[in-house]
Amino acid sequence: MFRSSRVSLAFCSLCCCVFASPKVDAQQIPFNHGISGNAGACSKIFVADAKGAEQALLPYKPGAAIAVVLGPNLSTDRWKELKVKEALKAQEEVGDLFAQRGFRVISKDQVDAAVAKLGLDMTSEEQWTKANLYRVGKELDVEMVAFSVIKETRQKEVSNILLGSYYEGEAELEAWLVDARAEAPILNDQAARGIAKRGMRDATKRRLAAVTFAVDKAFEDLLKPFPKLKTNGKSK
């Protein structure tokens, strides 16, 4: 009887937790929580979406400031000029994703200046630490700092019986987002892959589009509760 009561109590507690979570105000979430791509890296706060899947909560509302630090491109491709463009595209796309939802994105020049002032070299893997991202956030007085590393980009030939042969662009990256105020991770080592399918004849555009899709995928779940702002009846 006692064992049955404990099971019932545990089930009730679990139900209360799951069904009450969607009502939590994102601003009131304790800042010592985060979501990690590596299990056990930190505590997590989730709500259940319509399909019952876990959904992470962003601890800030639109209006909060975010700095996007330029990350390196580790692709094995030898086309250096394109690798620079891909890294810049990743930085730009992260900023656009947040700006389109009403977050205040710090200019690239300001972020670059802060990184230089702190003496950081974000091309060095040894400096890819949350502590350094917190330092950037405090230097710029912002709530959040984002950072991404492109792991690989490529294009491959695809054969199709009906469409013949064509090329696809692919990009793989990892993304981080930290709460600079609370010095806590929000998104950690989030891996994502983007594919730019047929329709683009230009190799550069294919690869850049793949990077954009990978960034969108990395932040998709986190930004899902925040719809894009509308301008003249159209989403930005």
Image (cartoon, rainbow, N blue to C red):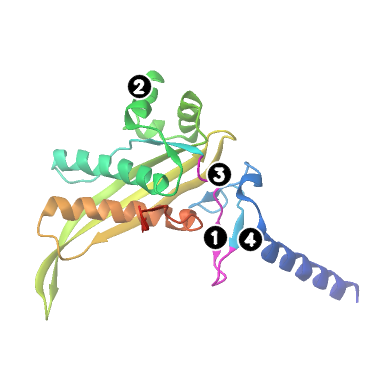
Q: CA distance from mark 4 to mark 2?
A: 41 Å
Q: Nearer the viewer, residue 143 or 31?
A: 143
Can you identify the residue that label 3 sits on?
60
Camera-nearest label, 4 or 2: 4
Q: Residue lying furthest front in this view?
A: 232
| Among numbered discs 2 and 3, the one appearing first in the sequence | 3
- Mark 4, secondary structure of its residue: helix
Quarter where residue 196 is shown: bottom left
| Among numbered discs 3 and 4, the one appearing first in the sequence | 4
Magenta residues span 48-63
Q: CA distance from mark 2 to mark 1?
A: 35 Å
- Mark 1, secondary structure of its residue: strand
Image point (16%, 43%), residue name: 82
Residues at circles 1 and 4 in contact by the CB criterion of under 8 Å: no
Q: Residues within 10 Å of mark 4 (few under 14, many from 20)?
A: some
Can you identify the residue that label 1 sits on?
55
Q: Position of residue 235 (x, y in %)?
A: 37, 56
Q: Is residue 165 left or right of residue 180?
A: left
Q: Position of residue 157 (x, y in %)?
A: 13, 65
